[in-house]
Amino acid sequence: MRFYVILFSLMLLVFGCSNKEIPEETKQLNNEKTLTLAIGGEPDNGFDPTTGWGRYGSALFQSTLLAYNKDLEITYDLATDYHVSEDGRSWTVALREDATFSDGESVTADDVIFTFETAQQAQSIVDVANIAKIEKVNDFELIFHLSEPQSTFVHTLQTLGIVPEHAYDSGYSQNPIGSGPYQLVEWRKGEQLMVESNPHYYGKEPEFKQLTFLFVGEDQALAAAKAGQVDVLSVPITMSNQEIEGMNRLSLQSVDNRGVMLPFPPASTNEEGEQIGNDITSDLAIRRALNYAVDRQAIVDGVLDGEGTVAYSSVDQLPWQNPEVIIEDGDPNKAEQILLEAGWQRGPDDVFEKDGKKASLTLYYPTDDQMRQSLSLVFADMATEFGIEVKTKGASWNEIEKQMHEHPVMMGWGSHNPLELYSLYHSDIRGMAYYNANYYQNEKVDHYLEQALAASSEEDAYKYWKLAQWDGETGMSVLGDAPWVWLVNLNHIYFINEQVEIGEQKVQPHGHGWPITDFITDWQLID
Amino acid sequence: MKRKWIIPLVIFIFIYITSFLLDRNMIEINLQIKNQAPSLLHLFGTDWLGRDMLIRTLKGLQLSITIGILTAMLSTFLGLLLSLVSSVNKTLDKIVTSFIDLFLSLPHLVTLILITFVLGGGLKGVVIGLMLTHWPAITRVLRAEILQLKEMPYVQLSKQLGKPLWWRARHHLFPHLAPQLLVGFILIFPHAILHEAAITFLGFGLSAEEPAIGIILSESMQYLSAGMWWLAFFPGLSLLMMIIIFQRFANTLKDYFGRDRSYEQQVND
């Protein structure tokens, strides 16, 4: 009897916890000008752009100097013009003069300088370390002096929201004031965020006057959507085969990629005593054979239910991808030929061997990520069937950090900033956190990457980003050194109220949820 | 009488041996047949990678039972050791009893999570964690038994004759403790299995490659709202059935021995 009492109270406890009440006010939906969104991604550090808020999607409260359009071309926002000097070190930016913060004060060059200097002091993930000096020309014009030429600085201008100097204090992240389309009404941590349109906004007035973002679990958000309480819902691919009445399903292409990182050098120990490199994957033939042996389309169809695209690089479908790097995969014959030419022979159990070494690898993946687990299991299955034995091992990120220099890892990247290519493949970044953790090194690639960064125009930069991938002889793509086996790009799945039109979206970056808010000011109500 | 405990035991051993005959490689990925509801071909359905849930469940049960047997033996052994230690003198007895009180005063699962987490999870962590949390009940019973036996005239006589502790333990104590040990072992066993599944479900236990029931259940949580009920239902039910079958066996066996009933109370708490 007592057992049942305990069991019952336990159940009460469990259900009591998970059934967090959906706040009352959100139940009155569809009264025209309000929207409720359940797209996850509550920012831990609040809404301060200088510490990372607004990297993905709309910053809501703040606006940026430049912006991207749907085709990832550069457009103006707070700025009316910008140009880069010949040597790529000086960036002159002119501001619009009619912009004001939501408290009515106008946005001036001082605020911009203050924002960038604050970001520098915060030493956060915002990429501003390269700024040597910011010079004020007049109230609406300023010049950034960089210590090194950096073509990707334009990306920083596109993502860093401007904060007001006069209203910035330690509590800013909880109570943001900015020149963006919306202003904060209320933020209840762990529950919801309410915003309303900013009457002082200089741009097009958004059609939806009030937005409510719900921060609830996936299952609960889905249940709320089915009850008609949510207008925009993001769901993981595992839940993509749902039908929700009154909502359209939207599957957006992304560069949110997943791939297997292969250690590049032979096994050794570095100065810090860490094990780096792997004697099997240091062989180019193995890395290329893996790339040719896997059937990426089968993975997309099988694991992702078709909700994704095949990936051959970390920058698929972005303007700086080299289109030549796409290969014909799922070709075990070609893979076998590559290995035979390099002196590998099939051993007794059909696994390739060379000089007494068996082609056997251990692939690590984070235990808490079921998608990466599934991808790892399927990849291992395909590789083992082909003749390169791959065992899988789930581990915590802490454990993976210790293993990632000497073992293959199922990783994911995907950014709208081409700087990511530099971070993943340049030999100077070897072993810095998760960047270039496989210790890839190729002098020529390094050189191209440096040139891309130093380029003074976008076109020039794109040219060198592409050359770094494949210049006809070498590169960091599959055709060249193949230090990665890129597998898939995950589609991002949303359910959107039938009456809401969100227009075309750009290719989505890593991170599912906030990026959908990119063009939130263009969202419209339709009949 | 005998039939009553033989039948559950035979079913239990049959399932255990069947699961041994299944090779681990039979859990193969087949994306063509993923997400299938239970059918004649796949009695328990298939998961999101097209793996047969029946085979996964059987392998999971095998792992659970193996861990159960191992940890039940280890805890019983630890219990025996500590109860012997406590019989040496008053001070040691005090130390052991305060340890018993300490461990009994904390909820099993909390201590288990703490220990397993500190040991870094995995098979080693789970086995050691389970061993260190399931010994107090049996230790208490054995200690009481030993206290009583120690005062028996023939044991006292042996002591007077200068027989060492180990000799007395082997010739006088063990024969009396043997049935207690067996029943204690059998009663710990289902507990250990359930706790292993629970802690693995919570993510502190076995690693995700192991085909453990706890892993199967926690993975299936993500698919429940997509309507794939069979992923959790059959493995959970199978685990429950195994435990019930074993419990039946344990209860009848305990009656068969007809020994001290005070046991049931302590071990079941």
Image (spheres, coloured by chain):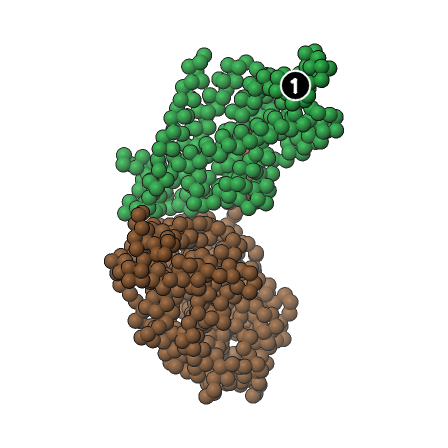
Chain colours: A brown, B green
Taking the image as drawn, is residue B178 in sight? yes
Which three-letter amino acid code belongs to the residue tagged 1? Arg
Q: Position of residue A282 (x, y in %)?
A: 40, 62
Q: Is residue A114 left or right of residue B24?
A: right
* Picture residue at 61% right of the left edge, 26% below the top: B80
Percent position of residue A465, x then y? 39, 75
In the figure, residue B180 lies in which quadrant?
Answer: top right
State the image quarter where residue A339 is shown. Answer: bottom left
Quadrant (top left/top right/bottom left/bottom right) for the C terminus of chain B: top right
The answer for which chain carries disc 1 is B
Q: At 47% across and 87% down in the image, what residue appears?
A: A87
On the image, the x and y values in percent for residue A211 come to 48, 61
Q: In the image, A17: left or right of B38?
A: right
Picture residue at 30% right of the left edge, 71% below the top? A324
The outermost residue toward the front is A355
Please indicate whether residue B203 sits to the left or right of residue A459 in the image: right
Quadrant location of the N terminus of chain B in the rendered image: top left
Which residue, given by chain and number where applicable, does mark 1 sit on? B168
As displayed, is residue A95 above or below residue A400? below
Residue A450's spot in the image, x, y percent? Answer: 45, 78
Furthest-left residue in this view: A333
Count numbered badges in the picture.
1
Q: Is residue B3 above or below residue A219?
A: above
Q: Nearer the viewer, residue A224 or A249?
A: A249
Left or right: residue B245 compared with residue A354: right
Judging depth in this view, the residue of A290 and A267 nearest the camera is A267
Quick check: A39 above or below B198?
Answer: below
**Residue A455, placed above or below residue B257:** below
Q: Residue at x 73, y 15 (%)?
A: B160
Front-lying residue, A346 or A237: A346
* Mark 1 secondary-structure assignment: helix
